[in-house]
Amino acid sequence: MAVLWLILKVLLWILLGLLALLTAALLAPVTAELGWSGEKGTWANVRVFGVRIRLFPRKEKAEKKKSKTPGGGKAPKGSAKAPPEQEKAPGAAGNDPQSGRKKTAAGQKAAKSAAPEKRFELTLDAMRGIAGTAGGFMGKVLAALRVHHIRVYLPVHGQDAAATALAVGRLHAVLGAALGALQNFFRLEFAQYELEPDYTGENAGKAFFSCKITAHAIIMLIACIWALVRLKKQHVI
């Protein structure tokens, strides 16, 4: 009895440990680090539990794998061929008791395939329900995303000083309208936002952009469960 209680106690501690790990994984933030630079190009990293994982660009391998065998791996001449298959005994197929079972199973499968299947009818109400659920799901997911540490530096160079000033003004207007629209869906936190008029063109190629996008897995899971429950109530799934 004592041994059984000890085994149950160990299993309970293992179950509690797995539950704690699952809870930590759901509550831990996952951060994607994205960036682009005119000098360094594009990069992307993921940070989980304080560990940074590089996604792009990939590290180049120091050494390439050598070819497996010279000559393309062809078999040498004179090699023994595979033995021919053994001939079946005459009348074996007819005396095989499993052949009748195979025929019966094949007949049952054919009967099942011939039976009419229930098809989902995509009605107008179903389309409205799917569209509303998809919109609500995307709204919850986007609202849970946090876009922070945004750094933007963009030098603007025109043909002359007047053209440069006009280009900076137009770019300010376009980016301002775009950021205003994006703030309806995301939480944007800027660390640097600079549009610099580059009259001499000496800063060409120094433009860069970087940001961090943080999300929690538990919020995504709750949004998925909400969408599935809503579709189930609407008899879509």
Image (cartoon, helix red, strand yellow):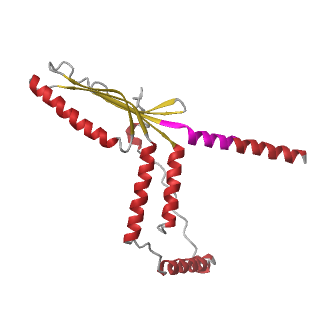
* Residue positioned 47% across, 80% down in the render: 116
Can you give x and y, in whole percent of width and height, for residue 160 in the image?
A: 9, 23
Looking at the picture, does residue 163 appear above or below residue 2?
A: above
> Depth check: 237 or 137 in front?
137
Q: Is residue 190 visible?
A: yes
Residue stretch rendered in magenta on the structure: 17-30
* Residue positioned 48% across, 63% down in the render: 231
* Residue positioned 54% across, 69% down in the render: 87
Can you give x and y, in whole percent of width and height, for residue 201 in the image?
A: 16, 20
User: Majority secondary structure of the magenta segment?
Assistant: helix
Looking at the picture, does residue 218 appear above or below residue 44?
A: below
14 lies left or right of 48: right
Location of residue 129 by image quarter: bottom left
> Does the magenta portion include 28?
yes
Q: Is residue 76 visible?
A: no
62 lies left or right of 224: left
> Does the magenta portion include 45?
no
Can you give x and y, in whole percent of width and height, for residue 181 in the image?
A: 30, 43
